[in-house]
Image: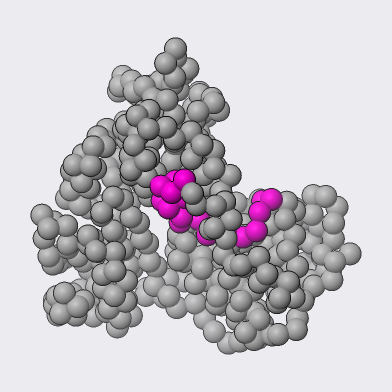
Amino acid sequence: MNQTKYLLIGGMSPAYASVSIREEDQTGAISIVGQQPAKPYDHPPLSKDFLQNPNMKEDDPECKMPNYYPDNNILLFESTEIDHIDPIAHIATAKSGELFQYEKVLIATGSSPIKPPIPGLDLPGVFMLRTIFDAVKIRNEIQDGKKALCIGTGFIGLEVAASLKQRGMEVVVAGDSLPYGKFENITFSEWMIGQMEKNGVPIHCAERLTKITQTQNGLQAEFESGLKLEANMIVAGLGAKPNLDLPKSLGLEMALGGVKVSSKLETSVIDVYACGDIATFPDPSTGELCRVEHHMNAKWQSQTVGKVMSGHSGEYKKIAYFWSDVFDVHLGYRGNSDGASPAKNFGSMDDGRFVDLWARPNGEIASGLIIWDDYEKIDPISDKLEVLLENKKDIADVEPSDLGL
């Protein structure tokens, strides 16, 4: 049986949590147990840098240098899936039968691509992007002049489309909603369609995929409207769902499609913590429960939960932050627009430099969407926006200078 003080289950999140643990506890044994046959890695490069750069190595996206784990007395168990936890005995069991005795355990099992029962999604040449291994398969199929179809108008669909286009492929996008529809900003979505088309990538919206078939020339996707699109390869970004089999088997309290946790990332069972995509937590700006599927949320929560598990009194207080890069469009989104309405905008869409702000019914600023053609401007504006959100500033009093514009 493996004896460990801290059992961290997952990939990227455990890597960052281990750093925070080591800052507080230099000697307690740490075991990171991951299902994938790879060291923990960051996901954002997979749809962008990794696809755009054929010389980028498969281990470049790794969260930490390989020597980080042995140098910090951290045991790394790859290709190991925990499928049972006994919270009374504090023992976790892997599918292989391997046992882990722990004092505290973090569950950060992330998300998996949604794969609806649509005929043809399993055909050769049809891909979904979630892991480094998916990214390798997609990159190996890239050929200058060949046709690619990206299904989905969210982060993955548009980022992959831009990356493949920049590698010389002919690319088309189709999805059942407007680009970045989750932001509920029709003006921005229509502007984004124009940006994609300006870069040679047409978008078909309100198109629901019904099946994919093989043809003499490659693949054909058919949609509910009757639209048919042919391609040599298809990348489907149809959303993601949290991996909840393990926490559900443990009987953890659930909320909003995830594991309910406190501001300290504690679950309903003592000595069991959760963070990242699977965690439903109190929104620091509203106090309402929310769940966020994005890299920065997972990274920040990992840093907090590592401190909490090792005896620190911290709480998770970061305000949600999304970001994306598509051609020369750089996007940052801060806050939570649930129940809010568009209230103010600064800058110019024509210039590709603007900020849209949402406000709650009581007038408090709720969120902001930042679009800038200079990548270096996104974070400074976002940081200033975070201060406004933390202070619950009245939207009527917000001026461009408050955002450094």
Which residue does the image show at 45% across and 66% down from the upper left?
296
Which residue does the image show at 10% across and 54% down from the upper left?
350
Looking at the picture, tell me which residue is in the foreground, 165 or 221. 165
In-image side of 203 versus 28 (left or right): left
Looking at the picture, tell me which residue is in the foreground, 182 or 49. 49
Which residue does the image show at 50% across and 24% down from the upper left?
120
* Residue 396 position within the rendered picture, expressed as x and y whole percent measured from the top left: 13, 76
* Residue 80 position within the rendered picture, expressed as x and y whole percent measured from the top left: 75, 53
The quadrant holding residue 368 is bottom left
In-image side of 310 versus 54 (left or right): right
Q: Quadrant of the N terminus?
A: bottom right
Q: Residue furthest top?
A: 216
Up-down: is 215 above or below 208?
above
Q: Is residue 403 magenta?
A: no
Which residue does the image show at 75% across and 68% down from the upper left?
75
* Residue 85 position within the rendered picture, expressed as x and y whole percent measured from the top left: 77, 60
Question: Range of the magenta residues?
Answer: 36-54
In-image side of 71 versus 137 (left or right): right
